[in-house]
Amino acid sequence: DIQMTQSPSSLSASAGDRVAITCRASQGIGNDLGWYQQKPGQAPKRVIYAASSLQSGIPSRFSGSGSGTEFTLTISSLQPEDFATYYCLQHNSYPWTFGQGTKVEIK
Amino acid sequence: QLQLQESGPGLLKPSETLSLTCTVSAGSISSSTYYWGWIRQPPGKGLEWIGSFYYSGSSYYSPSLKSRVSISVGTSKNQFSLNLTFVTAADTAVYYCARQGLRGVGFWGQGILVTVSA
């Protein structure tokens, strides 16, 4: 199985800050990685697909980068509505695996 | 707009079988482009991929659940189901059905909480 190691597990930031979340895969997965945002009581929502492609309807302050084993989700200027938990998901090979999640909290 | 809706019992006793149905609207589970599957989330914890199935018959499951889980076409058109046998308290979670494809998970249901308690 491919293990996804996500860091940090949580972070505190202020509105307007730039934040970055990282996922590392235990083996190469090409660009078969997505990033998902989940707010309390809601289903997750994809924000990035194919490692760096912005999901339709998602603000351009979200960006993704990386390929192979190292991936990063960056929010260029954190907005109040961005405070949530973020997960990466590898879908290169079965079983698909999620990172442990990163909770982005208000400082 | 594609919609997925989970349904099923919200409370089970240990050793019972969890059976959930996902109803797909404005889309077809017989599409050759997508897989359909289930993901769960224990209260306060992270996401766990359960498995996927393709309408033509192939399916893939999490190794940790493989001996207890099956995903298949439902009894009605445009439905698919999840069965998980011999549940324990560790299976308490919100269960999401989802459309899966080459870009990962694109659409999610709203989720249904299933609690296992004696």
Image: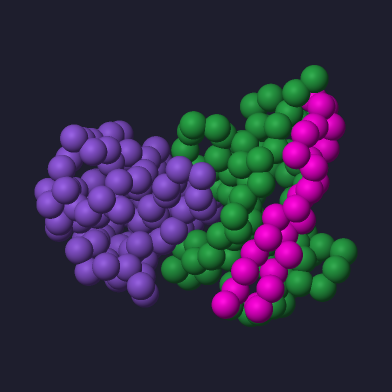
Q: Colour of chain B?
A: green
State the image coordinates of residue B95 (x, y, percent, origin top left): 63, 46
Residue A97 image position (x, y, % from top left): 47, 47
Q: Nearer the viewer, residue A91 or A88?
A: A88
Image-quadrant location for residue A28: bottom left
**Outermost residue toward the top in this view:** B118
Query: In the rendering, at what x and y percent does residue A76 appear?
Result: 15, 58
Asked whether residue B62 is in view, the answer is: no
Say if the magenta span includes residue B96: no
Q: Quadrant of the C terminus of chain A?
A: top left
Task: State left or right for residue B34 relative to residue A12.
Answer: right
Q: Is residue A43 left or right of residue B80?
A: left
Q: Residue B9 location, x and y as percent?
A: 80, 42
Q: Which residues are magenta?
A: B1-27
> B21 left or right of B97?
right
Residue appearing at x 57%, y 77% in the figure: B1
Residue under the image location 22 percent in, 69 percent down = A60
Q: Which colour is chain A painted?
A: purple
Q: Quadrant of residue B33?
A: bottom right
Pick out the residue farthest to the left: A17
| Magenta highlight on residue B8 | yes
